[in-house]
Amino acid sequence: MSDTVRVPTPFLPNTSPPASPDTDYFQRSRRPLPMLVALLPLVLLVEFGLSWTPDGDATRVLARLQLQELLEFFTLAPVVVVHALGGLVVLVLLVQHVLEKRPWRVRPLDPPLLLLEGCIAAVPLLVVGAALLPVTTPLLAGASETSTALLETLVVASAAALSEELIFRMGGMSLIHWLTVDVLKLRASTGTTIAVVTTAVAFMLYHDPWSMNPQAATFIMVSGLYLGTLFAQRGFATAVLAHAAYDVIALT
């Protein structure tokens, strides 16, 4: 990993000059606006799905509940708390886009290509999960292991992926990278490595590894390392989509 790698930090502007319109897909797709467009189907699915099934498994996804508890601490209106997840994802990516001062346009093929990339990026998780955990779904803390309805499966997977990647990768990795690189003046590659490993450990602890067998705990740690690396190399949207694609398949 070279020293030029920078973890996407949502609250800091990108000081590099804007890329030309001919920039390839792999650079364009790391920008916040294409990521937001690609993630909007998941955001809308969660928001409408929670309205259709207010007592479903998606309401018990642990990371989403923790976001709600944090907002309740600030005595925000109940409607804001209920829809906090989708609102935070949209707000963070919009703020990042505004700070980067890029044009408000997205190439039509970029969002579907991001969706495809996310599905492909889920394959390593599926392979490792099939080898270690043929009958469990450890990435869904707080949700039941099986869902009978396709809609419920999609809503649970989307809610888990959006909330966990928002907390651990977008929030946790960005904060650690800022502390290590911008404050402590470590090399960018060192800061990225520390961010990936630290949030992977936190991701494993969040899933309560003491309540599962060693293979499950190992899988969660490996998943955290993989998703953190994916976030650092390809951005927030790819990590979310890979996470969601894995969860959908694991739940079916």
Image: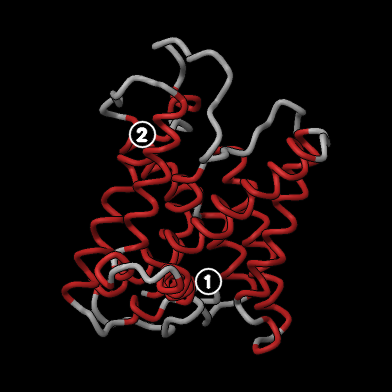
Q: For the residue carrying disc 2, how many other residues have a C-alpha within 10 Å: few (<14), some (14-19), or many (20+)?
A: many
Front one among 44 and 146: 44
Residue type at mark 2?
Answer: Pro
- The answer to whether residue 81 is above or below residue 7 is below
Instruction: Check residue 208 in the rendering and tell me which mark sits there, or answer none.
Output: none
Front one among 193 and 134: 193
| Residue in view at x 32 percent, y 55 percent | 87
- The answer to whether residue 144 is above or below residue 239 is below
Residue type at mark 1?
Answer: Leu
State the image coordinates of residue 189 (x, y, percent, origin top left).
77, 36
Query: Viewed as shown, does residue 11 lie left or right of 42?
Result: right
State the image coordinates of residue 32 (x, y, percent, origin top left).
42, 35
Q: How is the image coloured?
A: secondary structure
In which quadrant is the N terminus drawn? top right
| Residue in view at x 76 percent, y 34 percent | 188
Q: Could you tell me how many numbered marks the image carries?
A: 2
Mark 2–mark 1 distance (CA, rounded to whole Å): 26 Å
The local secondary structure at tag 2 comes to helix
- The answer to whether residue 199 is above or below residue 146 is above
| Residue in view at x 64 percent, y 60 percent | 224
Q: Could you tell me if the residues under marks 2 and 1 are in contact, i.e. CB atoms within 8 Å?
A: no
| Residue in view at x 51 percent, y 57 percent | 165
Query: Viewed as shown, does residue 238 lie left or right of 228?
Result: left
Q: Which residue is the site of mark 1?
A: 139
* Rendering quarter of residue 112: top left
Q: Which residue is the site of mark 2?
A: 34
The local secondary structure at tag 1 comes to loop
